[in-house]
Amino acid sequence: MSAEPQSGTAQLAKLYVLGPLGLFSAGDRNLTPRGKKTQGLLALLALAPRGQRTRVWLRDKLWSASDEQKSASSLRQTVFELRKDLGPLADEILDINRMSIGLRLDRIWIDHHVVSEDPTALHKLEVSEDTELLEGIDVADEEFEDWLQMERQIWYDKATEILEAHPRPAPSKPTPAQTRGLLVPTRSTEDLSENPEPGTFSVGFLPNIQQGCDANTQHLADYVLEGVARNLREFEPVAVFDFRDPTVHSDQFTQAFETEYYTRVRTMQVRDSLTLTFFLYRSSRMALEWSQSIQTSADQIMQNSMMLEGFIAQNVDRMAKSMFEDRLRMLDSRDDWPPKVGYTALNLMFKLDENALSNSETMLLQGDDAHDAASVYPALRAYLTTFKIGENVGVLNRGELDDARLAAESALANNPFNSISLACIAHVLGYVFHEHDLAGGLLEQALNLNQSQPFVWDHYALHKLYTGEFEAAYRAAERGASLGSFSPISYSYDTTLAMAATMAGDHRRAIMAGQRALRKQPRFAAAMRYLLLNYSKLGREAEAQAIYGRLLDVDPEFHDPEVQKERFRFAHKQDESSVLGILKRLTT
């Protein structure tokens, strides 16, 4: 096997276990199972010496607390779910009989097997001993956890041995493993020896402060720091200088004098009470810029991943404002450093006026000239076209549609491991070109890469709305609105929540979310559209009429039933007919 599947071979799928679990078809369609036990089954097969395990062995690892009859039934159900997730590929890559279950290794490429057969492929795959095996997998069984801990130790020892025998060449740019959204290596000297391009944002990780932490909480500080860095890197290149490890030689910090910001996390635990505090320092002032804290119980934060992901997202938004927007103002008069404008350009789009949209487009075009093809800019330029359709900002012509298609295809080819880029591309393909199947696959891939980006959850919710899966849309919208509550574009997340709650029948929740969105952005037509529906559903006709008048001021063409259909984009005819009936009542 080579480091990547070769064209013309019989390999029909790619399975990644170094880092987050990911299964993709030969055409890069995301087939990663959603069920935890199904993911566990796939992991157990992937790391089997010959890709095969007996049914008895699998039952013991996945349902160790169940009796033989129940575990056998559970295994059959899990195999059924795996076959369903794989679709037509199931019969091609699975080998199932009465005694065992396996993967056909001649038809599926597995990164772990590649490294086992060719140790030098470790460099081609851009992974290291710090790349965690099956990162983030969560199967609630003690036997599985024991197996996973042993396999991770075997992998770490093997990777360390390979790197000692075959040292990695110094990288000239961020590696694909980093842009795939994997955690920033916490103890890797490669990150510390980065030689960032002029204008690259830089941040230093100071040693954590830990007081009273136990084995369950001592990793939280590192997790927060690395999650923040990962999310920032999806907007712009960010050089990280890691000062947490006192054993790293000072030669590795030759570029660290340029570091503009420093961060650290303090974890204080008193019995079950836990306080996490994130600090941002600005080096130019040698002072604390700001700090942010959450207080909870250790049990709650371990059981509720949303709490920790929300804390990460909150700090990312505050840090992005400090780093990206301040640097943009500083670079206005500089010609030697290209501006970094991804974060600012996206926020400008949501100001919902033609001048802001034009400025955003200009920023992205100028910035793109100074960046490599793997930047987020092409995806953002494609995404910009959706405002000209959905919010009727500006005019969209055939040439711009063609440009959007080309930009989306280019971004997908050159930057497939950036969750924000994938979400932008998916929204363009689904909303503008109605290619919902492809959009859904890209959004699932984006979520596999990064679960803490509210932008991704929000667009996943929109996709589920367009395809008529309202309960799934509601759950995703709640998560996006919660994670993005401190974002400059949080009103957009509130609006998606209002839309999803409307279609799920929770009209009071929809009204609360819609009102919150309009307080933040009074011109957001999407929030008005759904607010008037919910007012009408609850018999609040005067309020519905008032919102309808405001909506016509922003979108004068909305009185046309054909425009109404296009603005709402309902998946089912009965929903469309119901809404058009409500709107007809309001105009007569």
Image (cartoon, rainbow, N blue to C red):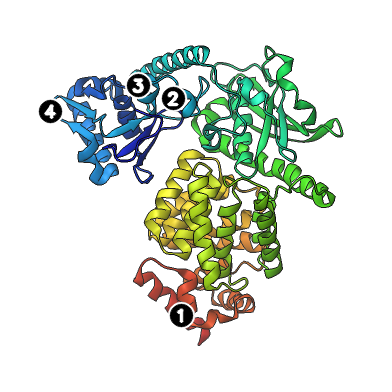
Q: Which residue has dot 3 on it?
A: 144
Q: Earlier in the sequence, mark 1 or mark 3?
A: 3
**What is the number of the mark on residue 121?**
2
Name which quarter of the figure residue 364 lies in.
bottom right
Task: Using the numbered discs, state the Cα–Cα distance from disc 2 to disc 3 in whole angstroms.
Answer: 28 Å
* Contact flag, marks 4 and 3 (Cβ < 8 Å): no
Q: Is residue 467 left or right of residue 452?
A: left
Query: Percent from the top left, x then y, of residue 218?
Result: 59, 19
Q: Is residue 325 left or right of residue 495?
A: right
**Secondary structure beneath label 3:** helix
Task: Using the numbered discs, state the Cα–Cα distance from disc 4 to disc 3 in whole angstroms.
Answer: 22 Å
At label 1, which amino acid type do we have?
A: Glu
Q: Earlier in the sequence, mark 4 or mark 2?
A: 4
**Secondary structure beneath label 1:** helix
Mark 1 or 2, which is nearer the eye? 2
**What is the number of the mark on residue 98?**
4
**Secondary structure beneath label 4:** loop
| Closer to us: 452 or 124 | 124
Task: Using the numbered discs, state the Cα–Cα distance from disc 1 to disc 4 in whole angstroms.
Answer: 57 Å
* Contact flag, marks 2 and 3 (Cβ < 8 Å): no
Q: Is residue 453 left or right of residue 84?
A: right
**What is the number of the mark on residue 562?**
1
| Closer to us: 524 or 294 | 524
Q: How many marks?
A: 4
Q: Is residue 520 visible?
A: no
Task: Using the numbered discs, state the Cα–Cα distance from disc 4 to disc 2 in whole angstroms.
Answer: 36 Å
Q: Earlier in the sequence, mark 1 or mark 2?
A: 2
